[in-house]
Amino acid sequence: MIFVESRFKGKLSDEFVKRIYAEIKDYKKINLVAAIQFIDQMNDFKERVKDKEFVVKQSLYRAMYPGQILGCDVYAADCDDCDATLAFEQGMFHVLGIPLKYGKAVITADPETENIEIINADVAEKYRKRIMQGIGAVLTAKKVMFIESTKSGQTYGSKMLKEKLRKEGKQVYSVLADEINFERLNEFREIDAFVSTACQRIAIDDMNKVKKPMINAEDLESYIKENKFIT
């Protein structure tokens, strides 16, 4: 499989820039991020708005460009002293991880449709509760299945987590796939919960496609370390 980079060629209209500015005017220091197709529009906005302090960071993980975020890499939004994040993005796929991971307000601006959305604390809290429910399901489960991807870099922590869960007396299984087929996962009726090592957004955006609870391996490991639930 070959991934080809594609950029949106449209320009930011003056009216759209004004509408975005109206949403960020109360913030002093703003972190800028973008999906790869909107990197040019993010940089254009930064050049056109001169009275705000913008921070564009380079991820040290998988993203190639300063400010770029992926569904499994939002580290460009790691800015402790920023008041908010402005994301040039379509939908919530890439940006949802920002309020969940860093707890900051996120304004999304879609250069193609000129739609602007605010991802506030209530939205983030709803997804946070779903994550905690998934963690609870794994920790109380008898049979746990790991969903492992054949894609490079998507095998987060699975060996260590499997060993820990087995020490707790749980039966641990694995399914390996290039693409996640949710209908096939639902055929594993005896499984109590799933742990995904693939793209982190799958266990959030696609949670309702699976009949049993599903959680990201990274979230599960973080919870175990913080609470020392499993030794």
Image: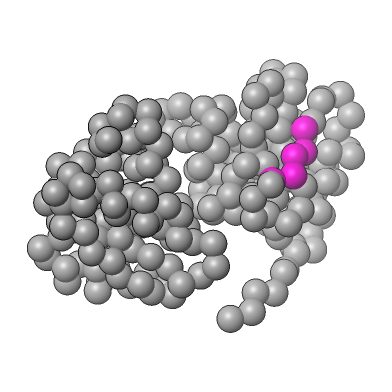
Q: Quadrant of residue 118?
A: top right
Q: Is residue 28 left or right of residue 132?
A: right
Frontmost residue, 160 versus 96: 160
Q: Main secondary structure of the magenta part?
A: loop
Q: Is residue 8 left or right of residue 210?
A: right
Residue interval drawn in magenta: 55-59
Placement of 184 over or under 105, stated as above or below: below
Q: How many marks?
A: 0
Asked if residue 116 can be seen in this view, the reply is: no
Residue 74: image x %, image y %? 59, 44
Residue 48: image x %, image y %? 88, 38
Q: Quadrant of residue 56?
A: top right
Residue 77: image x %, image y %? 64, 37
Residue at coordinates 74% horizontally, 44% vertically from top-left?
Answer: 58
Q: Is 32 colored magenta in this rendering?
A: no
Q: State the quadrant of the N terminus.
A: bottom right
Residue at coordinates 23% horizontally, 64% vertically from top-left?
Answer: 173
Asked if residue 87 can be seen in this view, the reply is: yes
Q: State the quadrant of the C terminus.
A: top left
